[in-house]
Amino acid sequence: MYGNFWDNLRNAFKHSDNSLFKLIAINILVFFVVLIVEVPMTWGGAELLFNKALSNLMIPSSLPKLITQPWSIFTYMFLHERFFHILGNMLFLYWFGLLIHQFLGSRKLANLYILGGLSGALLYIIIYNLFPFFNDKVDGGLMLGASAGVLAIVVGAATLSPNTTFHLLLIGPVKIVYIAAFYVIYSYVQTIGPNAGGNIAHLGGALLGYLYIIQLRNGIDWGVPVQKVGIFFEDLLSGRKNKVKVSYRSKAKTSNGGGFSSFKKTPKSTPAQVSSDEATQEEIDKILDKIADRGYEALNKEEKRKLFEFSKK
């Protein structure tokens, strides 16, 4: 997971616990497929046909049109038309997605992305159909892009570990809570701009990211339905028939974005049942409380390893 980026991306679908690289790979593949198809169709004078086909994958703000293409509520979140659009989204998905994967594991990362995309689409449709400012835009409104799902991950990571610091070019060290806050405020201001629909979706994704983490701390995982669907298709493609198990650990002490409730609760074991390399529930609780008090950066290498291994169980 943390080795060479391109190796992980190339082998994204060979492993079951790396939804981060699967999401990045799907977005990149879709982008290049659209680009490869667009060029010859434009050369051949079929640009209008191409645009119509692409619009069927974008989510419309018009409810009557959405009814005719319900799949677009999912497909829109994997579409990009401009290089710098997908580049920005994938960089943020990678940087903040690594944190979510470290804290919560691969499946919850996918949950956040999908639920963030759905939440963004829902808020986009509601706002466009309720507020007079969008009356002349609702019939022709179309939206695409991974931004809502990505912003859910950004805000989710900032909620989990607000004091984690990124070193930004020309700026220096900045806590991720400030990065997330900047993009939420910027998106809010831009909801009356030329890309109003996209920025409204950003806010929907951001709200979902925050609430998802808050609910996890209370022992409630909103992503269970998404997780079950994902496991179903994984088992279908691999020929397995495994039962879906969803569990969590009890609420831990919180401060500065503290405790977690999304890890599996393990049964008590005797010393003979736990190897020296395997973390016990008590050790994990202490690690999580340390994160709550001092942040993820305070963990040593061994504590990070135990937390990562435990999150995959």
Image: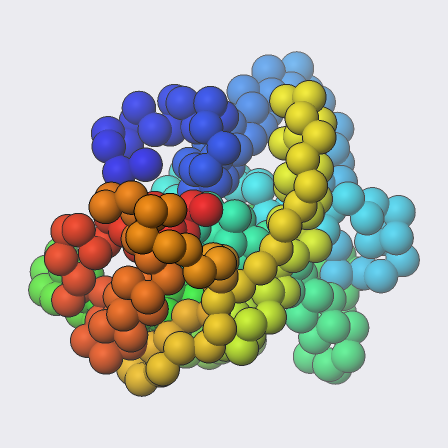
Q: In this view, does 74 lie to the left or right of 303?
A: right
Compared with 68, 251 (above or below) is: below
Residue under the point 46% across and 77% down: 251
Q: Quarter of the image holding residue 153?
A: bottom left
Q: Quarter of the image holding residue 254?
A: bottom left
Closer to the camera in the image, 88 or 151: 151
Residue under the point 40% across and 77% down: 252
Q: In this view, does 155 lie to the left or right of 211?
A: left
Closer to the camera in the image, 21 or 184: 21
- Give the image location of residue 10, x and y in percent: 38, 22
Image quadrant for the N terminus?
top left
Closer to the camera in the image, 192 or 71: 71
Q: Can residue 197 be seen by looking at this rendering?
A: no
- Give the image location of residue 136, x and y in percent: 75, 69
Compared with 263, 21 (above or below) is: above
- Give the image location of residue 198, x and y in percent: 56, 61
